[in-house]
Amino acid sequence: MEIELVEIRDFLAERPPFDVLPKEQLDLLPKQLEIRYLRRGSLFPPKDVTKSELYIIRSGAVELLDEHDNLVEKLGEGGIYTTPCQLINFSRASQGFVTEDTLLYVMSCDYLKTLRQSEESFDRHFSESMRDRLKQAIRALQDHTDHSIALMTGEISSLIKKTPITAEVNSTIREIAMVMSEKNISSMMLTSGAKLVGMITDRDLRKRCVAAGVSPDSPASEIMTSNLETVQENTLIIQALMIMTKLQVHHLPVMNGERVVGMVTATDLARHQSTNSAFLAADIRKTETLTELAAINERLPELQFQLATSSATALHTGDAISSITDSITIRLIEIAEAEIGPAPVPYVWMCGGSQARREQTAHSDQDNALLISDEMKPEHAPYFEELAKRVCDGLNACGYIYCPGNAMASNPKWRQTLQVWRKYFNTWINKPEPMALMLSSIFFDLRPVHGESELFNELQSEILNKTRGNGIFTAFMAANALQHRPPLGFFRSFVLIHDGAHDDTFDVKHRGIVPITDIARVFALTKGLTQVNTTNRLRAAAETSILSQEMGENLIDALEFIASIRSNHQAEQFRLGIKMDNYVSPGELSELDRKHLKDAFRVIQDMQETLDNRYQGGRFR
């Protein structure tokens, strides 16, 4: 092969999607290309072409503009322009200009079609579905060999190995015991028709039947445990462990809706835990001092590192780390109450922000608040002040630094009765102002952690009743959701920071994750949805008229991919002994990841444009 053709082949072999072509196809490819040179200032694509062609930038730069002359994309070395072949046109570009002297490799669309038909992996790159491309990218990020830690954030259904063994509630104790003995099981779930109504364990047979002198021919319902704690089959294993250790139960029925699908036991979890050193929940429950808790929490960055280097999704990683934070918070409250006594009136400790959304990383501050019953009297205030101080100080000692905006229960403003919280939200919703928008990411994303959940449920119900269909409030929230824009448009696709401290990076949290959480919050408040997690909010919104199923899935996939990029970035910083942050350099990403990240940012751009048009958010910016 001529040396010029070898150079072209080697250039393409290092760049997606040509890097997936087999050697024989790569060897043939250079002969199918034309080489074209365009001077700076030339139109792009060239106007003198007579057939549809794909363009590969060998060197130089091309800017693509929309119909309003806004820059939507900049192609540099290795960039591919596919629109003439009627493939995907993510950029919405209607014209372009060459901004540097540029050398192009030109391929006919007919030959591209031949390659797509012959090579499946090559064809996938050009899928017309952005959803498919993002899902493919997510799968690639999660394709690692170490799966041991990922099991920790697996769903509880993965531990179920047998079909559930049940019996009718009108069976006798003797019949239940015989089946348990025959099947060699330690418990039996009792049903009435298809409904789970109770459970009998070996311990129940000993204590409630034999020791109590109850006849084995009596109905099983006489000794069964009713009002069972159950979990859904998609519950994380770590959450099931937290439930069992907190309630001190050894058997947990697993449900699909109202249908029993299996049972997990303490033995199942202990066996599972023995292969995963990062199980922290059980250790947290055993702690007696703040020093012990802080020592356990020092393992949290390592947990995130192990999760990031396993096949765990960003969704499950956030859920797992948030569950640990919940567990630490609960234990701090329990330790405090053991020292200062029980609360004089009912209350609920609420978390806000990323913890409430179950989207935390090991690099998080604390956002929390106290909701106290209206039974509270002035003489009760010192108790709750002391409780809040102990817990917030404890969280800070454990590595959850004080909220920079002082949005914590230790601040008396955020330690109030139900009546006062109602007034707060009435003001924020009925008279939207900058303060309401500033607090929206914290207090419109609340979740109960410990205490009387009914207090929270009552408040949440009133909040959603006021926001549902509230056009003015929604418009303000939509305008707020447009404040954080994806970093697209300049410097070969990404707008980068140039402030000295974080040169040539972009803030993946505030420019990628926050825009999606803001969008999902608008949908949830507009439709009165109770979900707090961003992914769950988008799924719920896609079941309504406010969001299409396709765009909902695209936003979910974009969030998962961007959050995975962030998690991997922080994991690498942990490995190198660097303080975790959210500033990602495009240079630390592969060319394929940069392309997928650009796809994800475009999904956000499209949805922000829709919000802007729908709610005329620009009026409030």
Image (cartoon, rainbow, N blue to C red):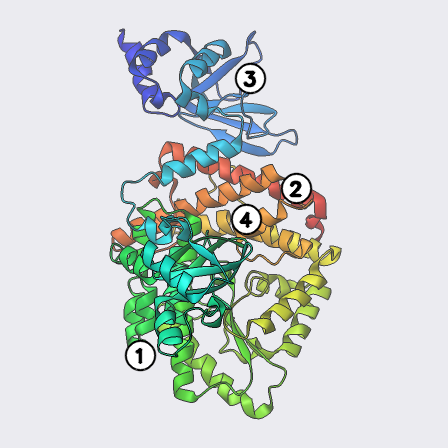
N-terminal of the pair, mark 2 or mark 4, is 4
Label 1 belongs to which residue? 289
N-terminal of the pair, mark 1 or mark 3, is 3
Is residue 58 visible in the rendered structure shown here?
Answer: no
Disc 2 crowd rating (10 Å Cα; few below 14, some 14-19, many 20+) is: few
Answer yes or no: do the residues labelled 2 and 3 have beta carbons within 8 Å? no
Out of 440 and 78, give the one closest to the viewer: 440
Is residue 24 left or right of 80 when viewed as pictured? left
Type of the residue with mark 3: Pro
Out of 539 and 526, give the one closest to the viewer: 539
Q: CA distance from mark 1 to mark 3?
A: 66 Å
- Indicate whether 448 appears above or below 469: below
Disc 4 crowd rating (10 Å Cα; few below 14, some 14-19, many 20+) is: many
Type of the residue with mark 4: Ile
Q: CA distance from mark 2 to mark 3?
A: 26 Å
Q: Residue furthest bottom?
A: 379
Residue for point 64% across, 70% down: 458
Label 2 belongs to which residue? 610
Type of the residue with mark 2: Thr
Q: Determine which of the numbered discs, if any, sits on residue 516 in the image.
A: 4
N-terminal of the pair, mark 3 or mark 4, is 3
Disc 3 crowd rating (10 Å Cα; few below 14, some 14-19, many 20+) is: some
Answer yes or no: do the residues labelled 2 and 4 have beta carbons within 8 Å? no
Label 3 belongs to which residue? 84
N-terminal of the pair, mark 1 or mark 4, is 1
Out of 67 and 214, give the one closest to the viewer: 214
Type of the residue with mark 1: Thr
The residue mark sitting in front, 1 or 2, is 1
N-terminal of the pair, mark 2 or mark 3, is 3
Is residue 151 left or right of 521 when viewed as pictured? left
